[in-house]
Image (cartoon, rainbow, N blue to C red):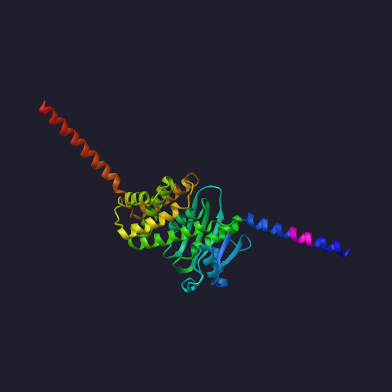
Amino acid sequence: MKKNILKLITSCTIAFSLFSFTVQAQNKERVTFGIDLTDAQEVQMLKEFGVSENEVSVDRITNDDIIKQLGLDPNDKSNYEGGCYSSSYVKITNNGGIQVQSNNLTEVTSLMLSNALVTSGITNAEIKAGSPFPVTGTSALSGILKGFESAKGEELSLKNKKAAQEEIETTSALGEEIGYDEAAKVINDVKTKIIKEAPKNSEEISKIVEGITNNYTVEISDEQKEQIKALMTDINDLDIDYSTVKETLKNIGNQISEVLKNSGKDIQDSSFFQGIFNAIGNFFSKLFDSIKNIGNN
């Protein structure tokens, strides 16, 4: 009798555990808090995200989580400096691309996060990222990735996540020189062509980077181009299927163009005007040759 009761209890415990895991994996909404937030600050972030704690599952992110998520060196003391305050709300969707809203992130914009999330392997999600007070936002990506993985019930590729973090760092560095939204456009344009064409070697990657970056009104230095090439080499090695990310990349590109247009700081692609000038030049060249031929005859 006792053995039967124990078997029943054990079976129920296992069944409950499996049920809990299934429910957790099927919960498409997740909130992550930086571990250093106070209880009051967590309440504040929930209010900003528009949810209550009993509606979503919650994870708290530590420096160790950040290091694990992004494949950072655990022996590098700089990875433990500063507190963990960035928080996020993640909702997995079936369509609509990636929609990111951010608040109080001073160096990592919503557009930069959108770009990096595609690289990490996410194509459809609604994201809100922020902090109770201004922070750089450099750890925001890891919290979002943790939230997505918890909501989906499976891990993303570490190789993709490392490339996504590299993309954040490269875009942020470029943004300090030409503007963060402008930098997001450059990276999105180059990455889209890299993924679409899947260049076979470094020479082809360099050609794509040079071809695109030379057509903006903002000046991009040779050093910055080399950083972009290094990033694109790593992204190219991910073998991302263009057909699976095409619409998401296009959607993000449209978001970036709209933001730049509304802010009056669009980096107009000069190749459009160059094409007009070339067409006019070719027209008059052919006209001159025709007149010359008539004169000779």
| Image location of residue 37, percent across then percent down | 54, 71
Range of magenta residues: 10-15
Image coordinates for residue 122, horizontal then vertical, percent: 52, 53
* Residue at the right extreme of this rendering: 1
- The answer to whether residue 7 shows anywhere in this view is yes
Q: Quarter of the image containing the N terminus?
A: bottom right
Q: Residue furthest top?
A: 297
Name the side, left or right, on which 288 lies relative to 210.
left
How many numbered circles are shown? 0
Does the stretch in magenta take in 285?
no
The answer to whether residue 198 is left or right of residue 295 is right
Q: Nearer the viewer, residue 47 or 267?
A: 267
Residue 257 seen anywhere in this rendered image of the structure:
no
Q: Nearer the viewer, residue 49 or 158?
A: 158
Q: Is residue 13 magenta?
A: yes
Residue at horizontal 56%, vertical 55%? 91
Estimate the x, y position of residue 45 in percent, counting from the top left: 54, 65
Dominant secondary structure, magenta: helix
Which quadrant would residue 285 be assigned to in this image? Answer: top left
Q: Look at the picture and state if 138 lies above or below 183.
A: below
Q: Is residue 205 above or below residue 178?
A: above
Residue 220, image x, y percentages: 31, 57
Q: Quadrant of the C terminus?
A: top left
Q: Residue at x 48, y 72 (%)?
A: 76
Q: Is residue 11 left or right of residue 274?
A: right
Q: Quadrant of residue 26?
A: bottom right
Q: Nearer the viewer, residue 91 or 290?
A: 290
